[in-house]
Image (tube, rainbow, N blue to C red):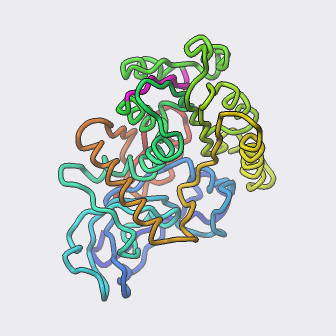
Amino acid sequence: MNAAEMIEVVLPGKVEPEGLQVRRGAVPSAGPGEVVIRMEATGVSFAEQQMRRGRYYDQPPFPFVPGYDLVGTVSEAGDGVDPALVGSRVAVLLKVGGWASHVVVDAADVVPVPEGISAAEAETVVINGITAWQMLHRKARVRAGQTVLVHGANGGVGSVLVQLAQAAGAKVIGTASVRHHAALRERGVSPIDYRGEDVPARVRELAPRGVNAVFDHVGGRGIIDSWRLLAPGGTLVSYGSASTRDDEGSKQWPVLKLLGRVWLWNALPNRRRAYFFNVWAGQALNRSRFRARLRTDLTEVFEALGCGDITAHIAAELPLTGAAEAMRLAESGTVAGKVVLHA
């Protein structure tokens, strides 16, 4: 790639992965308060899979550049930005725009990546890690000796949740397809086959008094079982609606239904709590507080990665121009961890 050329991948509309378009242009410049990041690693998360179908509840209108997060090196700092940032490796949460060789962001949004962590390793725990950390510690407040149920325990968020919960001293029950059970057992997880087993019955066998927290990205009717499996004082954290990924119709309706259930459950006279987790909550009301919390929590995640409490699960690494293949692989359900793209 020419040093003065930018490459980005465009999602033009509701297309198959092969419909993604590669666009080339001039490298952007940093404005006041901004930095240019030369991307080293970005990835395919469930959000991009939903966006490709037009199913992500607040995605921008087509066409746009997807890419929920990235890790890279600051190549230029604009006016008012500490020039010492240039040359440092940072991570940033974007929602869209990460599938590009160069990205312009507000300098206040970048989080330093510690020495000794590669770009690909760090990438696996940006959106996945911050989601897992905040759900576990800010919402469910899981403590040592508790038992938690993690749906999709082999996935991007799920695998980080499993490790963070274990680092906190919790016992973990995880749902996954059978092909991932051996790996989960090696990590000390009690696996359940969500296709071939009666999940609620199996969870009750493993935790007769109920579980202290459930982390549910599936949504749909199964969210009711997740609620019923809670022990008194337990917490349900819903953070997606994977079961409706391929549905037609309104993309907001599945989320609105989840929000309605959460409101109703919390209005009932019981000792359990439910949350619908959105990593962007509070950004519009208090951006400086949002940034500070994000920086604090992602720094904790990087420290956990550095000390070995969590490990980076890289499913595959492909070039940015191979985004179509990466999307296919991420959607196949055959890999564990995160599919990473590099410039």
The span shown in magenta is: 169-177
Q: Nearer the viewer, residue 157 or 289?
A: 289
Quarter of the figure with the C terminus: bottom left
In the displayed orientation, state which residue is furthest to the right.
249
Residue at the top extreme?
A: 205
Q: Between residues 189 and 168, which one lies in front from this camera angle?
A: 168
Task: Determine the residue positioned at 62% across, 23% down.
Answer: 194
- Taking the image as shown, residue 181 lies to the left or right of residue 92, namely right
Q: Main structural element of the magenta stretch: helix, strand or loop?
A: strand
Q: Is residue 147 placed above or below 302 in the rendered structure?
A: above
218 or 179, nearer to the observer:
218
Residue 188 at x, y percent in the picture: 39, 19
Tell me the quarter of the picture where residue 86 sits: bottom left
Q: Residue at x 55, y 59 (%)?
A: 20
Identity of the residue drawn at 60% across and 17% down: 209
Q: Is residue 240 magenta?
A: no
Relative to 186, does residue 169 appear above or below in the rendering? below
* Total marks placed: 0
Q: Quadrant of the N terminus?
A: bottom left
Left or right of 312? Residue 129 is: right
Can residue 343 be seen here? The reply is: no
In the image shown, does 150 or 332 lie closer to the viewer?
150
Image x and y of residue 167, in percent: 35, 32
Q: Which of the 4 image quarters holds residue 62?
A: bottom right
* x, y percent for residue 84: 19, 76
Q: Picture coordinates of residue 325 (x, y %)?
A: 48, 47
**Is 300 positioned to the left or the right of 228 in the image?**
left
| In this view, 296 is above or below 215 | below
